[in-house]
Image (tube, rainbow, N blue to C red):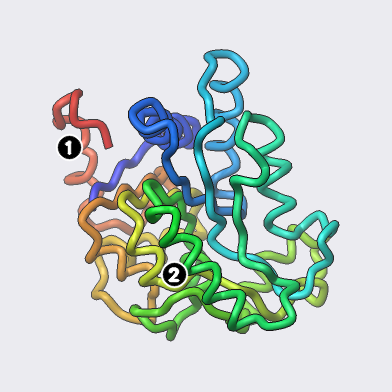
Amino acid sequence: MEVVIAPRDELARLAADAVERLLVARPDAVLGLATGSSPLAVYDELARRHAQEGLSFARARAFLLDEYVGLAADHPQRYRTVIDTELVSRVDLAPDAVHAPDGLAADLPAACAAYEEAIRAAGGVDLQLLGIGTDGHVAFNEPGSSLASRTRIKTLTRQTRQDNARFFDGDVDAVPTHCLTQGLATIMAARHLVLIATGRGKAQAVHQLVEGPVSALWPATVLQLHPHVTVLVDDAAAGRLQLAGHYRETYAGKPAWQHL
């Protein structure tokens, strides 16, 4: 696990660099896309590179981490709609190359199984963008989630719904109580995981993620077992890291050719 502590705009640039290097090397790469506030600056930077520098997504495919259950197809907070707004509509990524769990399916378990199969059929995810919740959840894998879990329906905790209420005009009761989410084992199958966290509110979760024991109590800690994880954090989110000085020193001294 590599931990990079830098200003927020630098974090977005570094994550975009990783996506760009992948797309240049493999134009048909499979991207894993996250929603929430953490990746928005990354999507802004990727859109800028597409518009100003010609970065192309034309042959790429993408899979979303999760989706609310029951939100209408035209709801502005439906995650497929959010990704369309924040990224797909701003680059040349084909809309039919972007896949999301079907939160409106009549048979939700079957939809989850079909989503797992679609990821496998695509050859797996090459680079997965991630955020982290204040309670250590990744995607919607809440505390207590099986570290071997796959795409499934989950009940959202009150804390997560409160955290997400800002996207629903502050109304926690408007936040759905269920979602479909990639499981921790599904996420761990991606070849490169890039997690972004900013702000003091994420400091405890980041500390557990990087330096705590692997435990279902903090689901993100399973990422410690992945061979290629990049954790991008600002000073505030790094505020509880015991080895912050070590992470800064090792990143500053790494060979330029090594990248993330």
The residue located at (75%, 58%) in the rendering is 167
Residue most extreme to the front: 121
How packed mark 1 is, by other alpha carbons closer than 10 Å (few <14, some 14-19, many 20 or more), is: few
> Mark 1 against mark 2, which lies toward the viewer?
2
Q: Provide the secondary structure element on which disc 1 rests.
A: helix
Give the vertical position of 156 relative to 182 (above or below): below
**Residue nearest the observer in this picture, 52 or 173:** 52
Mark nearer the N terminus (1 vs 2): 2
Query: Which amino acid type is marked by label 1?
Result: Glu
78 displayed left or right of 134: right
Residue at left offset 70%, top offset 71%: 103
Residue 158 rendering spot, x and y as whole percentages: 65, 81
The residue to which callout 1 is attached is: 249
Q: Is residue 164 left or right of residue 255?
A: right
**Residue picked out by circle 2:** 136
Q: Residues within 10 Å of mark 2 (few under 14, many from 20)?
A: many
* Amino acid tagged 2: Gly
Is residue 116 or residue 91 the one in the foreground? 116
Residue 256, image quadrant: top left
Q: Position of residue 244 (x, y in %)?
A: 25, 49
Location of the C terminus (image quadrant): top left
Q: Is residue 37 left or right of residue 121?
A: right
Residue 137 sits above or below residue 202 on the image: below
Left or right of 190: which side holds 42?
Answer: right
Tell me whether the residue at label 1 lies in contact with that at label 2, contact meaning CB atoms closer than 8 angstroms.
Answer: no
Report the residue at 14% width, 27% height from top.
255
Residue 61 vs residue 252, the one in the foreground: 61
Residue 108 badge: none
Q: Is residue 190 above or below residue 157?
A: above
| Residue at mark 1 to residue at mark 2: CA–CA distance | 26 Å
Q: Position of residue 7 (x, y in %)?
A: 44, 34
